[in-house]
Amino acid sequence: MNFSKGHELLDLCKEHNKKIYEIMIEREKIISGTTEEEIKAAMRESLEIMKASVNKGLTENIKSVSGLIGGAAKKLEDRREKVRQPVCGSIMSKAISRSMAVLEVNAAMGKIVAAPTAGSSGIIPGTLITLAEEFNIDDERLIEGLITASAVGMIISKNATVAGAEGGCQAETGSAAAMAAAVTVELMGGSPEASLHAAAMCIKNILGLVCDPIAGLVESPCENRNALGAANALISAEIALAGVTSLIPFDEVVDTMYKVGRSLPMELRETALGGLADTPTGRRLKEEIFGNKKESR
Amino acid sequence: MKDFSMFDIVGPNMIGPSSSHTAGACRIGKVAYKISGGDIKKVTFLLHGSFGKTYKGHGTDKAILGGILGFDPDDEKIKFSFDLAKKQGLDFEFIEEDLGDVHPNTAKVLIEKFDGSKIEILGSSIGGGSIVVTEINGLELEFTGEYVTLIIAHTDRPGVIAKVSAILAEYAINIAFMRVYRHNRGQNAFMIIETDDMISDEAVKSVINTENIANAYLVSIK
Ligand code: SF4
């Protein structure tokens, strides 16, 4: 029971009349020689870390190692509580503040789950934990959701890349958003097909997004792009749940994302030599952070 | 290459901000710590390429020092490793240095122990938190720490390798990969043994007590 492509996964789901996470669990049992209980227990640990990182980012005074970011997630929480009706609605507002919270914790040397990378680590917890709060979803189903997310991420990793250095930010935050969108559809009762349509839409929406972190640090614009990823996941899931399909199938979108990523110039793939990193302000911030070199006790 | 596990995709669990600059750096430190056997008086980190240029912003310094203190990449104490090292009376220093034609994220770890002995380890963080160690005490070799790894320093003599594999067999340990490295015939050499099974302290001791074996270190990293 193994698969590399989205259409193979859907065939397996159909053939065995199973959900995406069930197929993924069967596969994991074979390749790692573990039991379903062990797999779920390990995923529960990941879920706990995700919850703790969201909580930390929303309640503590976070400052990143460089000092570039920190405290934004909390500001969003404060505003939502104050205005009661955020401009993008409560669910979206929560999802973006929660995903930003995790990214801030990451940038402040806190504990996170790379999902699929550290730079995109806010998107899946931000989306899932918001859904859990708003729709009363229990941990068991969230654990299944994380497993579904891993199936989508694995297909992308096998056929393209999830690394900003290889494929730009579309590969990193785009993949995380696609994973989150697939889970959102599943948790809301959509079919495996609809999950992959949502994942495809997510990647299509940000195709070509460059990776240009200021001073080469996973902080800015990364934090806002995690918010964007969570929003993208919800938008795409909503569209797919309405029965709208992606004109270009998921597998073709993944291949395209890889091709587009490879055609991005090296300056726009995590080297911090182009894009926002290469603006006058971006260069100045870099100078300020990495001014002097040697340090000892 | 091993097929992806779901935990390669949703995971690893780690201290941020970067799998290559933080988690990988911590692993390099941890391997150096394991090989040194602890009791470290002073450690100097020579940081090359992107490690050297960006270590402050990525917390590479805290992470690699955390590894020297024995922390895993998901240990929240990493953030406080400077203070924890000072409390232990451990001297540490970071120097940006060009280490030549190596991976951009490479560090050389120079360890000075209380008994006066010195150890040098060269390691690279090659992405996603994975590492590769390419030199111990100037001897070129290669291992990743992904498997349970037994590193044996021995004198290059006939029969030494057979004795080691006999001991491992006795403890029902299956060898996945094994490589031998040496400078010259009959001199100091290293065996790198990667196994499928955990190796007990007892088995390691029995290896150390074998003739022509100077030392053995068990390295297994999460
Ligand atoms: S800009 Fe680059 S470093 Fe930042 S989140 Fe996107 S891919 Fe990651």
Image (cartoon, rainbow, N blue to C red):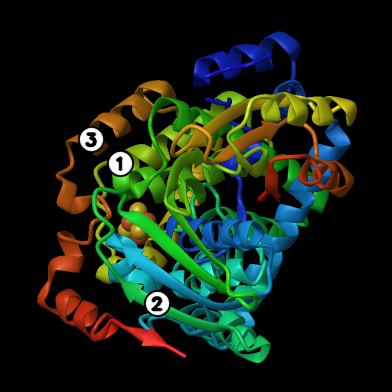
Instruction: Name the image quarter holding residue B116.
Output: bottom right
Rounded to the nearest whole Å, what is the CA distance between mark 1 and mark 3? Answer: 6 Å
Chain name for mark 2: B
**Same chain? Circles 2 and 3:** no
x then y, percent, for residue A65? 44, 80
Res. A262 mark: 3
Left or right, residue A13 beside residue B28:
right
Three-letter amino acid code of the residue under disc 2: Phe
x then y, percent, for residue A257? 31, 33
- Residue found at x 77% / y 54%: A45
Three-letter amino acid code of the residue under disc 1: Gly
Task: Please tell me whether mark 3 sits on a helix, a strand or a loop.
Answer: helix
Q: Which residue is mark 2?
A: B94
Task: Please tell me whether mark 2 sits on a helix, a strand or a loop.
Answer: strand
Three-letter amino acid code of the residue under disc 3: Arg
Q: Which residue is mark 1?
A: A167
Instruction: Name the image quarter holding residue A33.
Output: top right
Given contact means CB atoms under 8 Å apart, are the residues at marks 2 and 1 in contact? no
x then y, percent, for residue A249? 40, 22
Instruction: Name the image quarter holding residue B37.
Output: bottom right
Res. A29 mark: none
Left or right, residue A163 beside residue A239:
left
Task: Please tell me whether mark 1 sits on a helix, a strand or a loop.
Answer: helix
